[in-house]
Image (spheres, rainbow, N blue to C red):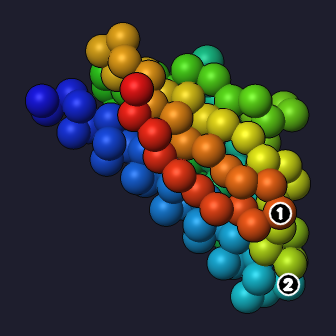
Amino acid sequence: WQTSLLGRLTAQRIASDLRLAKIEALRTGATTKITFDPAQDLFIYRGCNSQPKIVNFPKGVDLYTTNFSQHTISFYPTGTPSMGGTITIRVNGKLMYLTITPVTGRVRIVEK
């Protein structure tokens, strides 16, 4: 159960940073970006006026894949994402999906 909890917490962290990127873009009027690196199990948050923030996945949680172009999603000053898509993480062979809705940027977490 601890591994499952770790997967949920990781998914919630990703979702929170995606929402933060959207809010920051709206607030500042500048584009924000999050780049995912499945090979290294991490993502890089690039805000408007700050240094890039690297977030490593915990041991046992794999960034399986994304379907974003170059594994990067941007949020424009309108709060709109560059595209909708899915981030897939794997925990003990089970997959969890974070889906980002095009236009609105809504983030949902789905466990399978």
Is 22 situated left or right of 108 in this image? right
Distance between the alpha carbons at the discs numbered 2 and 1: 17 Å
Percent of width and height locating residue 14? 50, 50
Residue ranking furthest to the top: 93
State the residue in front, 15 or 56: 15
Q: Is residue 61 visible?
A: yes
> What number of labels is visible?
2
Residue indicated by mark 2 = 29
Residue indicated by mark 1 = 103
| Type of amino acid at the residue the image marks with label 2 | Gly
Percent of width and height locating residue 30? 86, 77
Residue 74 tag number:
none
Foreground: disc 2 or disc 1: 1
Is 91 situated left or right of 68 in this image? left
Query: Compared to 104, does 88 lie above or below?
Result: above
Q: Are marks 2 and 1 in contact (CB under 8 Å)?
A: no
Q: Secondary structure at mark 1?
A: loop
Residue drawn at (47%, 46%), measured in percent from left and top? Answer: 109
Residue drawn at (58%, 56%), measured in percent from left and top? Answer: 107
Q: Is residue 42 visible?
A: no
| Type of amino acid at the residue the image marks with label 1 | Val
Percent of width and height locating residue 43? 60, 41
Is 65 situated left or right of 77 in this image? left
Query: Compared to 103, does 73 lie above or below?
Result: above
Residue ranking furthest to the left: 1
Query: Compared to 29, does 41 lie above or below?
Result: above
